[in-house]
Amino acid sequence: MGNQCQWHLWLVLAITCFVSQNYVAGELERVHLKAQPRNGNSSKGDGFLGFLVVGDWGRKGAFNQSRVAFQMGKIGEKLKIDFVVSTGDNFYDNGLNSQHDPAFLQSFTNIYKSKSLQTHWFSVLGNHDYRGDAEAQFSPFLRQIDSRWFCLRSFIVNADLAEIIFVDTTPLVKSYFLNSDNHTYDWRGIIPRKRYITNLLKDVECALRESTAKWKIVVGHHAIRSIGFHGDTEELVNYLLPILKANNVDFYINGHDHCLQHISDTNSRMEFLTSGAGSKAWRGDMKKQRREGLRFFYDGQGFMSLQLSQFDAHIAFYDAYGTVLHTWNVWKPIFHSSM
Ligand SMILES: *[C@@H]1O[C@H](CO)[C@@H](O)[C@H](O)[C@H]1NC(C)=O
Ligand SMILES: *[C@@H]1O[C@H](CO)[C@@H](O)[C@H](O)[C@H]1NC(C)=O
Ligand SMILES: *[C@@H]1O[C@H](CO)[C@@H](O)[C@H](O)[C@H]1NC(C)=O
């Protein structure tokens, strides 16, 4: 495993950024993906970047998880993807109970077996992951079992052409802290919540402000905009969205609602992309309100791909048969400054 990885993974710890005189950020770990010269004539290392996005998946193959996984393998091969992004809710119903939980093998290693998927998997946690031992998913032990796995609360993947900032959105959602849903959450490392959120938002702002990448992408579990069952996440609309807009983020990518969805922001160039259809779907719940900017909604299983060059981005959504359901192109103005 890992032999197919054409990118070298570098971990750079303790990046510091001075946002203001009083605050020193630096909690976000940074992963550098460096193109390796390859034998033969692969498309990589020539300024293109491609990856798949799947969310809300870990059900030991059930609810079409295996079917989606198989099609991800086929599309991944075709697009010569560089890595996979997971938008969280990695293990149902209650995350992993420890780093030894067999669900890791049953829902991840043994399901995503295709050759093209034997590459880095960058994952955030979803609310269901917080119902188990949240920290188990960060354990280096899991990377020994399956070297593809990379999960942290919040981190940055720098792939030259794009900078992808992974944001731990669950602690931002207040209702999980009110015990109103009778679930217990693993808040070790999160409480006091206010301080955690303040630092997180500053880290995200700092990372975006410093980024000189052509494409700026932010990934979280919860939606900013969604017409699915959970709808918009108020806390993200209020606290995260203004930071993303101020820093010209191109794409916000999430899961949480078990659907595929594309909404264009009505007053900026940002696209909201939901890929949360890795297993259980077909909830049959679509909200009628706030439909402005809606380009596409699919209530069933599937996944998404994103292909980037200096000049354009190509988005595609696929169902459980690998059929393309929706595509979208975004062009970068040639003289666009990302600063
Ligand atoms: C590159 O790929 C094409 C098509 O697969 C092939 O015809 C060509 O010989 C390859 N070139 C090299 C240098 O491998
Ligand atoms: C699996 O996918 C097929 C095709 O979309 C769908 O008809 C079927 O209902 C799905 N099964 C489940 C359990 O969601
Ligand atoms: C939570 O548990 C209490 C006590 O068992 C029960 O009365 C209440 O209905 C439950 N709430 C939910 C949302 O399930």
Image (cartoon, rainbow, N blue to C red):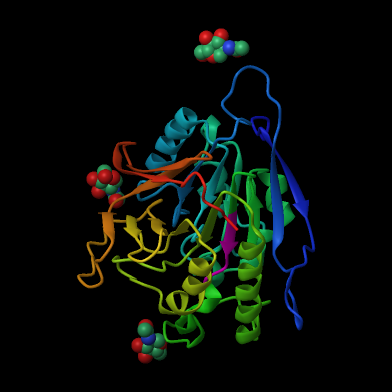
Locate residue 320: give its quadrant. top left
Between residues 85 and 108, which one lies in front from this camera angle? 85
Observer-nearest residue: 243 or 152? Answer: 243
Tell me, yes or no, if residue 147 can be seen here: yes
Give coordinates of residue 199: x percent, y percent: 66, 77
Residue positioned most to the left: 288
Figure quadrant of the C terminus:
bottom right
Prevailing secondary structure class for the magenta stretch in the rendered image: strand
Report if residue 87 lies within the magenta region.
no
Observer-nearest residue: 235 or 283? 235
- Residue positioned most to the front: 335
Q: Is residue 11 above or below residue 127?
A: above
Q: State which quadrant residue 38 falls in.
A: top right
> As drawn, is 204 to the left or to the right of 259?
right
The image quadrant where one finds ligand 3 is: bottom left
Q: Which residues are magenta?
A: 164-169
Q: Is residue 239 left or right of residue 29?
A: left
- Res. 98 visible in picture: no
Q: Check the image and report above or below for 178 versus 208.
A: below
Q: Where does residue 48 sit, x and y in percent of width and height?
A: 55, 35
**Which image quarter holds the N terminus?**
top right
Quarter of the image where one finds residue 267: bottom left
Q: Residue at x 53, y 55 (%)?
A: 217
